[in-house]
Image: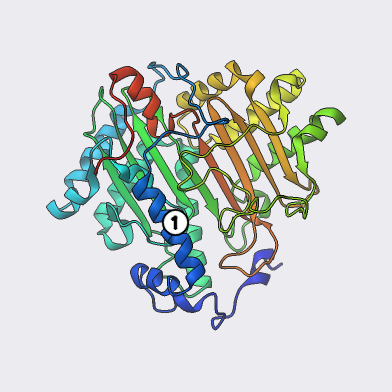
Amino acid sequence: MTDPYLRYRREQDDPRLLPLIDADPVTYVDRLRANPRVDALLSDWERLFASTSFVGVTDAGDVEDGLFEQADEGAPVAGAVAAAEKFLACLDDVRRDAVRHDLNSRVWRAWLNPEIYLHRFGVRLDEASPEVREHALRLLESTLSAEGFAQARRIMRINAHLGDLVHGQGVLNEFSYNVNIFGTPSLTQPWGWQIYGHHLAVNCLFFGPQVVLTPAFLGSEPTHLPGEPPNTALFVPAEKRALELLASLDDVLRARAVLYAAKRDPRMPPGRIAVGDELSLAGAFRDNRVIPYEGARIGDMTPESRAIAAGVVAEMLAYHPPAARAARLTDLARHLDRTYFCWIGGHEPADPFYFRIQGPTILAELDHHAGVFLSNPEPERFHTHTVVRTPNGNDYGVALTSAVTGQRRDLTGL
């Protein structure tokens, strides 16, 4: 049986693929910018990166203080410090200088999830030696859960498969990702690391035995490799739990939760479907976005539905190490009366959809997209984006470190 996404494989002479042919990451961007519409989009991203300071995602424009405190959450800081030191030690002086940044560096905010190599910070793994790649992977493995590390590696391998499908291996490959280090790896003082590239971006801030792992973007086109069972595709566990949550609601709460019954409902206001982001609201360069609460309040749900909602969030946080995920779920439980679940789209087995769970300490969204390198004109489940944020200023661990140290981080440094 042919995998459904292969029906949408583009021919090599498809205009969408021509900029990829024989391109490296830099020439690919130059070719894209010849299109005025793309150039305008990239210029806006560059403006947002260069001209803004960090505030944080909020629901109404004001950051709520007092939500984040220092605590021993059992984060794997010792292993991460050791891995980071080995990673730095294997770099030559030029690359080591390129990788290291101040804790308040704006480079934190440079991440983006398209294949467009716009911000060229740190070390790009497909330009590095096998030793550097291996130590970079060990840094990820030291921090993420076993499930999260496996998920990241699967995203990277599927990216290579996509590059093969579209004859763009110079741009889309297993190691087309950049890695950066912020501050000095320490068992007690704040420091962090970052990886970003196509469909994978994770920002990690350690403060002793506490870790913040947002913003995080995990996605894939397609969501599985040829021959793999569809029920093992990336993000299926979160999709199943979200569908279960929707089905568990009574008619009143369901009517509140479902904002639009169609993924691309004609009743949506202009701009609700965004180029690149589709329905996602909290992606790259949206660090300060005001995202009002929408949908059904989880505190109004039955105990059964509240437990399912916690399960949805647990799946979206599966990349966290277990103790950190437990701590984030405890934060969620404290604020259920101010946490909301919304849905756009259908709920039949093949229907694409969007959902978001958002409260004072969590924003998690999943969105099915139309093809970018594949040709499907409408959203399909085999192209998925997920974003996780910590609202009220604690993306990149800013609110936590600022509260404990008394020094405000606005992420405007070099």
Q: Is residue 31 left or right of residue 281?
A: left
**Residue 164: image location, x then y, percent:** 49, 71
**SS class of the residue under badge 1?**
helix
Is any atom of residue 138 visible in this view?
no
**Residue 273: image location, x then y, percent:** 64, 54
Instruction: Check the image and name the residue furthest to the bottom.
Output: 13
Instruction: Check the image and name the residue furthest to the left.
Output: 93
Q: Is residue 27 above or below residue 299?
A: below
The amino acid at mark 1 is Asp
Number of numbered discs: 1
- Image point 17% across, 49% down: which residue? 97
Question: Which class describes the residues within 10 Å of circle 1: few (<14), some (14-19), or many (20+)?
Answer: few
Residue denoted by label 1: 44
* Nearer to the camera, 61 or 72: 61
Q: Is residue 174 left or right of residue 293?
A: left
**Residue 224: image location, x then y, percent:** 59, 57
**Residue 281: image location, x then y, percent:** 57, 44
- Image point 35% across, 36% down: which residue? 142
Is any atom of residue 107 visible in this view?
yes
Q: Is residue 317 above or below residue 163?
A: above
Pick the quarter of the image with the C terminus. top left
